[in-house]
Image: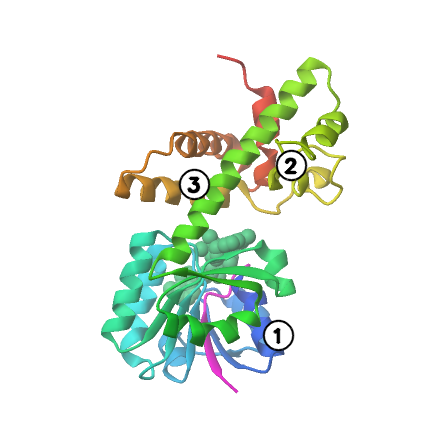
Amino acid sequence: MTTVAFIGLGHMGNPMAANLVKAGHKVLGFDLLPENLSVAQGNGVTIAANAEAAVGEADIVITMLPAGKHVLSVYESVAKGARSGALFIDSSTIDVDSAREAHEIAQKNGLLSVDAPVSGGIGGAAAGTLTFMVGGSTEAFLEAEPVLKHMGARIVHCGEAGNGQAAKICNNMILGISMIGVSEAFTLAEKLGLSHQALFDVASTSSGQCWSLTTYCPVPGPVPTSPANNDYKPGFAAALMLKDLRLSQEAAQSVGAATPLGAHAEEIYAQFGAAGNEATDFSGIINYLRDAKRQ
Ligand code: NAD
């Protein structure tokens, strides 16, 4: 039985930790919010007094935190007290530079580490079907793979330190851009008198086909499971899409990559959020575009 310390028991961390308990691991958990600790306890997680206490006994340490600054502050405070050779897995979505800094902290303290952000959302976390995008050495990846398999369906080694985060933000930049593209096509079709179903039937089997259309269609009807059929309740909230687009643009800036559509998608989602839609599913962008005036 492996002992796992789980730091960050929020929307994603709690169901992920629960799956590790179900798989037979001893899980020591810590979060700053007492209500999240109660949920974890109900799922069979042993609550630690603080992050240091959880990590001291663990073979594997998993963090699922909001942003790079939280991950670095936890790594700084716990790495020294970790067991020699313990494996650190950061599954938060954070900027590539902070991810690489976290690896350096781990390495300096004689620890193995991977960045392993996820795709699949809260539903995937609960079902244990997340996709993990993993950056780190082959040795660290092979150590991480068995425990990640208890929380995910697909585990992809993307290369060295930070490459998991790189894969995550590149994927989500495609997603943000493609959702805006699909939404623009539906709003244009409406004005041209073309029905949603007719556009869907053509584009879903033609060159316009993509995930934002066929799995997550932003209009109600053609894909009954998409959030458009549930009043645009998330799903994947617009605030999280904006976070990932921002991370993609920070990364693009730091390496001098031209991503004009990524930058424009960030701007559009920033306006959508500022108009009071942060908690709306990101596919709700179609309603914002429908109301926008042509310049
Ligand atoms: P969340 O805000 O629900 O959970 C984060 C938790 O971290 C909170 O419970 C908070 O109290 C805790 N925390 C913050 N600082 C801490 C510290 N120093 N020590 C201990 N706990 C601390 O967020 P979430 O939705 O679970 O997302 C977590 C990460 O996963 C984020 O990076 C997010 O971008 C990423 N992500 C989220 C989704 C999603 O659908 N929610 C999908 C993919 C990736």
Q: Amino acid at mark 3?
A: Leu
CA gap between label 3 and label 1 equals: 35 Å
Q: Nearer the viewer, mark 3 or mark 1?
A: 3
The mark that comes first in sequence, 3 or 1, is 1
Depth check: give the residue in front, 70 or 49: 70
- Side of 181 relative to 229 (left or right): left
The vertical placement of 276 against 167, above or below, is above
The percent position of residue 224, horizontal first and vertical second, equals 76, 42
- Side of 50 relative to 126 (left or right): left
CA gap between label 3 and label 2 equals: 19 Å
For disc 1, the neighbor class at 10 Å (few under 14, some 14 to 19, many from 20) is: few
Depth check: give the residue in front, 212 or 79: 212
Residue 168 in view (yes/no) = yes
The percent position of residue 103, horizontal first and vertical second, equals 30, 65
Q: Residue furthest bottom?
A: 1
Disc on res. 213: 2
Residue in the picture at 57% in, 54% down: 121
The percent position of residue 86, horizontal first and vertical second, equals 36, 80
Residue topped by disc 3: 245
Residue topped by disc 1: 42
Residue in the picture at 55% in, 19% down: 292
The vertical placement of 8 against 186, above or below, is below
The mark that comes first in sequence, 2 or 1, is 1
